[in-house]
Image (cartoon, helix red, strand yellow):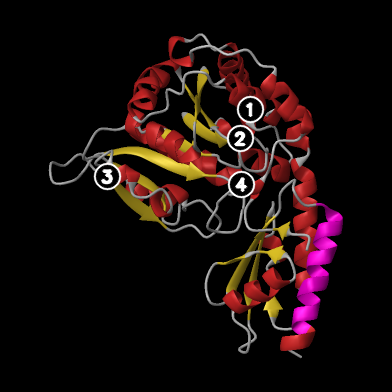
Amino acid sequence: MKTIDLRRDTITLPDKIMASEAFKAPLGDSVYGEDPKQEELEAYAARLLDKDGSLFVPSGTMGNLIALLSHTNRGDEIIMEENGHIRTSETGGAACVGGLMIRGVRGDDGAPEPESVARAVRSDNIHYPRTSLICLESTHYRYGGVVPPLEKFEAIRSIADQSGIPVHLDGARVFNAAAYLQVGVREITRYADSVMVSLSKGLGAPVGSMLAGSEKFLEAARRYRKMLGGGMRQTGWLCACGIVALSPDNIARLKQDHENAALLAQGLRELPGLSIDLHKTQTNYVVATLGEPGLTAPTFVNYLGERGVLASASSDSVVRFVISKQVDRKDIEEALTAAGEIWNEHVR
């Protein structure tokens, strides 16, 4: 049976071009600055993101943790949207490794209200932790790949500047955000002092993320990368994949994922008792809520799996689908057919 995997965009595999570039890449010791492809990738990513420089790291979680450590001191406090990936899904690294507190601020569109951020900044008082960093996220993972408004980023940036606090952007899927907003990625990263971008999600590289920022920031970040085990030595094959992942054609291809997500959302929305907020289907995520009492999300996911369609149950009533380059329009149509069959058999 053919499998249509709609669980995560992390299931992407290198295409023929990426694989070809990988295995003809030269190798060198990256810790000594002698791996030519890592040097090339880091310079290229820095230009794309409009920062002084960038670092290749094994994962986005490591990249975010390095950023937190580089911007803060133990006992400090970080402000971020309360459901930010750094707070909910990175195994408590901020607290365990960095000795940091996180102050969550609500923001249903993926970014907290600027007024709430301003109120959350601590005054200079020996009883309080120091507010030392504000974290933003785009696209926002927990809210179904939504893209926070740039107006809010601009306002939060202004508050950060007034308070002398740096801003870090968890931009794992920031190129998806740029595609949705129809702007260059620099129009988003300009509001952050540092930014992490994943290569191994929609962009299709097998491993890796980029962490970009100022030269002063990178001085600290290089040391923390080594401390956390990110000195990977011969990285050329992986970095060659990263260069292809960040190529203009590959970035432009993300729009196809968004179009396929819209097609899936519109088709699923026609099923009685299944609701989807099309206004929040902005990038490559589709979040469906089951209002049918006789069918739970885990059961629906199991029925889909029996028909070769893989999805994720986020709760008893919510199913999440994520589109990637591994699926095309025909796959989406087949997934919709499978969902319709399940509805006919178990709901109507």
Label 3: which residue?
96
Identify which amino acid the numbered label 1 is placed on.
Gly
Crowding at dot 4, Cα within 10 Å, few <14 / some 14-19 / many 20+, comes out as many
Please tell me which residue is depicted at 61% across the width and 46% down the height of the picture: 10
Neighbor class of circle 3 (other Cα within 10 Å; few <14, some 14-19, many 20+) is few
Label 4, label 2: how far apart the Cα atoms are: 9 Å
Name the residue at 67% across, 23% down: 22
Q: Which residues are magenta?
A: 328-343
User: Disc 1 designates what residue?
Assistant: 242
Q: Amino acid at mark 2?
A: Leu
Disc 1 vs disc 2: Cβ atoms closer than 8 Å? yes
Q: Secondary structure at mark 2?
A: loop
Name the residue carrying label 2. 199
In this orientation, which residue lies closer to the viewer: 25 or 63?
25
**Which of pointers 3 and 1 lies earlier in the amino acid sequence?**
3
In the rendered structure, are the residues bearing label 1 and label 4 in contact, judged by CB atoms less than 8 Å apart?
no
Residue 10's mark?
4
Establish if 121 lies above or below 266.
above
Measuring 56% from the left and 19% from the top, which residue is drawn there? Answer: 42
* Residue 143: % across, % down: 56, 59
Of marks 1 and 4, which one's residue comes earlier in the chain?
Answer: 4
Residue 145 showing in the rendered view: yes
Camera-nearest residue between 125 and 107: 107
- CA separation, marks 3 and 1? 30 Å
